[in-house]
Amino acid sequence: MSKRRGRYIVWEGSDGVGKSTQMAVAVQESRRRGIPTRTVREPGGSDIGAPIRKILLDPNGPDLHPKAETALFLGDRAQLWHHTIEPALEGGYDVHTDRNWWSTLAYQGAGGELSTDFIVTAHELFMPEGYLHPNVGLVFHLTEEERQARKSRAATDEFGKPDRIEQKKQDFFKRVEHGYEYVRDRLGGTGVHAAGEPEEVTARWWSYVFPEAT
Ligand SMILES: Nc1ncnc2c1ncn2[C@@H]1O[C@H](COP(=O)(O)OP(=O)(O)OP(=O)(O)O)[C@@H](O)[C@H]1O
Ligand SMILES: [Mg+2]
């Protein structure tokens, strides 16, 4: 009998909306249920990802054109999919990812003012259907005020200060949120309101990730 193919499950949304917190809950429950489970993150999840992540996010790094950013993300993504995600799915693992290409649509597209068509076409060229259309794609959203408040309470961070993308201006983040609206309205992302206690937020996505009667 052939093995059940795993599901590709995406956790998306602006910085600080609670993606990592909620994904950790799902991963713990998934393992508790005995579901073979792997986790990845973008950028930088692939075996060539560490230097790419550093170039993309290091606040002391060069100012990058959004097209250069997109190209770097794509290199990491293609490697991550072919070397890690696809073999895991094929082997029956559910793969949970902290961000995927929807981030590029929101940050480099809406935020960086590259056209949606450019981002979509580039990803259609490089990435397979299974990556473009995840089995489950959750997009968390908060108002900008709620997000900033949560972000300012958060313990930072990988570079000892906000990363290169986090340092952008408020207008940028407003555009990013519009990008995520597009992902929810037009690309099949499932919107999840991220306000409230973590347990309340969990209750909103639970049935998408664990659809069988609980
Ligand atoms: N429902 C919640 N209510 C209040 N605080 C929360 C909630 N969920 C997460 N937090 C806190 O908000 C901060 C951001 O959460 P988290 O790191 O999960 O967000 P994220 O979307 O992964 O952010 P980033 O994009 O920066 O990785 C953390 O300090 C976390 O403990
Ligand atoms: Mg996170």
Image: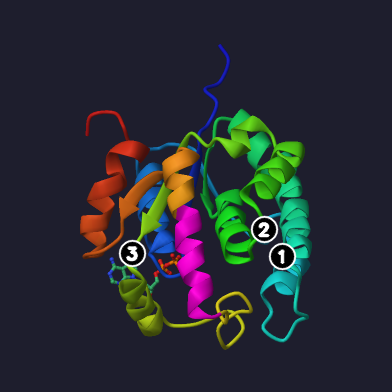
Residue 164 picture location, percent across and down: 64, 79
Which amino acid lies under the numbered mark 3 shown in the image of this protein? Answer: Leu
Between label 1 and label 3, give the one nearer the viewer. Answer: 1
Position above or below: 148 against 107: below
Q: What number is the disc on residue 114?
A: 2
- Please give the name of the residue rendered at 67% of the width and 35% of the height, measured from the top-left corner: 87
Q: Which residues are magenta?
A: 169-180
Residue 176 shown left or right of residue 18 in the figure: right
Position above or below: 86 against 32: above
Which amino acid lies under the numbered mark 1 shown in the image of this protein? Answer: Pro
What residue is pinned by disc 1? 66
Is the CB atom of the residue marked by disc 2 within 8 angstroms of ligand 1's nearest atom?
A: no
Q: What number is the disc on residue 142?
A: 3
The answer for how far apart the CA atoms under marks 1 and 3 are is 25 Å
Instruction: Kindly check if marks 2 and 1 are in contact, taking CB atoms under 8 A apart as contact.
Output: yes
What is the chief secondary structure element of the magenta stretch? helix
